[in-house]
Image (spheres, rainbow, N blue to C red):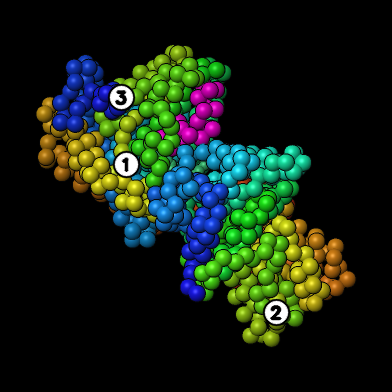
């Protein structure tokens, strides 16, 4: 059996908001604005997420995958990246996407079933969410490989859940990374369930991190609700990757507070006490806010202002997304090929005629 | 008899199979405690336990591959693939192994199993959840592919698939899971694989459809009936093997055919049907066979789903064309 500490992974910030001795060391060199930014992002992402769940209930967006509870893992890791780095998310990484530079409006469009929501602004190396599980993992290895072959400094990150580690693509991606010593980071948010299936049904090993050994890459297990530890571990992995030391598999141990998606009922497979413990005792925001407040970096008033600011920004995004021009049906054909083959031109014409007639 | 939805009928068939044959097992993602994401296996895990209704790791190649091993070693696995669009990681196992084992082992180790998968659009599902790629599997020799469109057929076809000695891909139109109820016998019965169902008889045009397109074809037939045109509607139901006789007989009677499917057009199952009818009923045809299908584009995210999926308007237009030819 793992000891409690190993179960949770590396921890710098304890649930009561105090730093461990290693945490003190990691905390000191971080610049004050970044310390505040960690919290601001977590807060904004949570507000967005809560709003999105309500929008789904109101029928204004489609099925949505909530991330509440996983903010620290997403914020800590994404803030350790630069603009030149590649990000390959799954469908739950709205937080990562926002930090990478995806406008909120686009994220909403995606969940409104609009393909425009897949496309990031120019210059942002963010892939559309991977919907088939684990398929983005080899993509990240490939992008990292290209960077290496081109002699560039950028790294690539694949985000995925614990369930994804059971798919062949996970193992193949890690193996390539090991064999070719690629500058890639495999970031697993082990939120302990793949829909209803618990982590113990995905693997007989006690951790995801230890799987790294089989591919001769580095593996780290970290408390996924500890934004400071996540940031530090990720920063280190990025630096190692940039300096040619190869790939890292990071396992962030966390929990999703809500259901898998808005179409799922988590009450069928999770005990209330378990969820309550994670929500009430191990929440990533509460813990970090305690630290900030104790250091005099955050106050009740700042909290109110920031919340108000975020809510306004989110409402603005909702308005923009809802009033975004609806593309005509012929948009189906817009980007299927660079040049539309004649048969598709004919199909598009038949659709035009149908719409007119 | 009870009034069941299509998904309840599927559940009922699996309950019967588990009850009467101890070698039947169900395996897949979320099929146990959760009862399946669509609730197809609701209650079965409680009743039959963890060794019969098995929550697996998230690994389609692993699920299909181990099911093949189970099958050759005496079990009768029913695999649930959560959505047809997620069968692709397991595609290799289906195509290279499940489908060919009987041939490769000259009958020694057939992969006797059922692969169930929800498929098709119409429920505003997220990206990549609404594929209709039945043609990939119909094109694979050694596999049987069936698609029920009513609760009665769902139960009987699934029981037939489970007792079938060959691997059967059992496709479940998500759109119809809960949209209709009908009387379904409580007892076990089989709807034979390889037989089409004549939904309604008609004289002027034959409409061929399967899955969620059957109600669309019926609605189009209703529309034309008001204008005095009588459509014969056939639920193809078994895409492989195909009930050529029923289809050909109908087209010889009406002289006109419209094939409706949700999948993209090119090399879709509709192309095969049209070729077969052309070969066997050419002299009876009064007009070229028409196809109403999805376009040759990736199944769109749901905002444009309605433009992609054939609807009554498109089917009616095709009927008009074959009549006016
Ligand atoms: C290849 C594939 N199989 C099945 C699914 C259906 N599915 C969607 S999410 C999910 C669970 C994923 O769990 P995990 O990888 O732990 O990520 P999490 O949702 O917990 O973030 C499943 C089974 C899918 N999307 N892709």
Q: CA distance from mark 3 to mark 1?
A: 22 Å
SS at mark 3 in the image: loop
Check contact, mark 3 vs mark 2: CB within 8 A. Answer: no
User: Which mark is in front, 2 or 1?
Assistant: 2
Q: Residue at x 26, y 43 (%)?
A: A275
**Place of residue B48 in the rendered image (x, y in percent of width and height, measured from the top left):** 44, 52
Residue B141 visible to an observer of this rendering: yes
User: Which mark is in front, 3 or 1?
Assistant: 3
Which portion, as a residue range, is magenta? A158-177
Seen in the picture, residue A285 relative to A171 is either above or below; the reply is below
In which chain is the residue bearing label 2? B
Image quadrant where residue A273 sits = top left
Same chain for labels 3 and 1? Say yes or no.
yes
Mark 3 vs ligand 1: CB under 8 Å?
no
Q: CA distance from mark 3 to mark 2?
A: 68 Å
- Give the crowd class for mark 1: few <14, some 14-19, many >=20 residues within 10 Å: many
**Which residue matches tag 3?**
A2
Looking at the image, residue B156 sits to the left or right of residue A343; the answer is left
Looking at the image, residue A221 sits to the left or right of residue A287; the answer is right
Same chain for labels 3 and 2? Say yes or no.
no
In which chain is the residue bearing label 3? A
User: Which mark is in front, 3 or 2?
Assistant: 3
Image quadrant where residue A279 sits = top left
Image quadrant where residue B287 sits = bottom right
Residue A348 numbered mark, or none: none
Q: Quadrant of ligand 1?
A: top left
Seen in the picture, residue A269 relative to B306 is either above or below; the reply is above
**Which residue matches tag 2?**
B201
Magenta stretch contains residue A160: yes
Magenta highlight: main SS: helix
């Amino acid at each position: 059996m793992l000891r409690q500490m190993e179960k949770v992974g590396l921890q710098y910030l304890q649930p009561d908001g105090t730093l461990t001795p290693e945490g003190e060391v990691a905390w000191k060199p971080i610049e004050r604005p970044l310390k505040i930014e960690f919290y601001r992002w977590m807060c904004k992402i949570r507000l967005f997420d809560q709003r999105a769940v309500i929008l789904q209930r109101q029928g204004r967006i489609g099925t949505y995958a909530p991330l509440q509870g996983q903010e620290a893992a997403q914020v800590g890791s994404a803030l350790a990246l630069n603009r030149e780095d590649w990000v390959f998310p799954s469908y739950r990484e709205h937080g990562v996407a926002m930090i990478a530079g995806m406008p909120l409006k686009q994220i909403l469009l995606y969940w409104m079933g609009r393909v425009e929501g897949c496309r990031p602004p120019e210059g942002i190396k963010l892939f559309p969410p991977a919907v088939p599980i684990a398929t983005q993992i080899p993509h990240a290895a490939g992008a990292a490989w290209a960077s290496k072959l081109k002699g560039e400094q950028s790294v690539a990150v694949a985000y995925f859940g614990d369930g994804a580690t059971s798919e062949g693509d996970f193992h193949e991606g890690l193996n390539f990374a090991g064999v070719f010593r690629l500058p890639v980071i495999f970031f697993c948010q082990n939120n302990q369930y793949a829909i209803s299936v618990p982590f113990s049904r995905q693997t007989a090993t006690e951790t995801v991190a230890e799987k790294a050994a089989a591919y001769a890459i580095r593996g780290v297990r970290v408390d996924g609700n500890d934004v400071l530890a996540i940031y530090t571990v990720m920063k280190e992995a990025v630096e190692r990757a940039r300096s040619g030391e190869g790939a890292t598999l990071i396992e962030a141990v966390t929990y999703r507070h809500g259901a898998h998606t808005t179409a799922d009922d988590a009450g069928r497979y999770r005990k209330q006490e378990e969820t309550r413990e994670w929500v009430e005792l191990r929440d990533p925001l509460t813990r970090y806010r305690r630290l900030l407040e104790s250091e005099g970096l955050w106050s009740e008033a700042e909290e109110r202002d920031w919340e108000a600011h975020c809510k306004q920004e989110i409402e603005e995004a909702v308005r923009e997304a809802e009033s975004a021009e609806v593309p005509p049906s012929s948009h189906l054909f817009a980007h299927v090929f660079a040049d539309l083959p004649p048969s598709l031109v004919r199909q598009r014409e038949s659709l035009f005629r149908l719409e007119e007639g | 008899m009870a009034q069941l939805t299509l998904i309840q009928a599927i559940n009922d068939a699996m309950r019967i199979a588990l009850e009467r044959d101890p070698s039947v097992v169900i395996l897949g993602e979320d099929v146990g405690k959760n009862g399946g994401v669509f609730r197809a296996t609701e209650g079965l895990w409680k009743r039959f336990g963890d060794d019969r209704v098995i929550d697996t790791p998230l690994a389609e190649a692993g699920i299909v591959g181990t099911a093949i091993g189970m099958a050759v070693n005496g079990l009768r696995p029913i695999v649930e693939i959560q959505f047809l669009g997620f069968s692709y990681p397991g595609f290799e196992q289906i195509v290279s192994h499940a489908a060919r084992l009987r041939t490769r082992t000259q009958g020694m180790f057939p992969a006797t199993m059922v692969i169930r998968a929800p498929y098709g659009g119409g429920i505003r599902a997220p990206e990549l959840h609404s594929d209709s790629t039945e043609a990939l599997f119909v094109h694979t020799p050694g596999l049987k592919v069936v698609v029920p469109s009513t609760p009665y057929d769902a139960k009987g076809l699934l029981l037939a698939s489970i007792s079938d000695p060959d691997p059967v891909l059992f496709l479940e139109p998500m759109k119809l899971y809960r949209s209709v109820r009908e009387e379904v016998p409580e007892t076990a019965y089989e709807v034979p694989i390889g037989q089409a169902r004549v939904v309604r008889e008609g004289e002027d045009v034959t409409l061929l459809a399967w899955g969620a397109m059957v109600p669309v074809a019926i609605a189009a037939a209703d529309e034309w009936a008001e204008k005095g045109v009588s459509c014969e509607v056939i639920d193809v139901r078994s895409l492989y093997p195909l009930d050529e006789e029923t289809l050909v007989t109908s087209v010889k009677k009406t002289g006109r055919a419209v094939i409706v499917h949700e999948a993209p057009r090119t090399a879709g199952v509709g192309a095969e049907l049209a070729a077969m009818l052309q070969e066997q009923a050419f002299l009876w045809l009064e007009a070229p066979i028409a196809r109403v299908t999805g376009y040759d584009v990736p199944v769109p995210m749901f905002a444009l789903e309605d433009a992609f999926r054939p609807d009554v308007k498109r089917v009616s237009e095709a009927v008009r064309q074959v009549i006016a030819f």
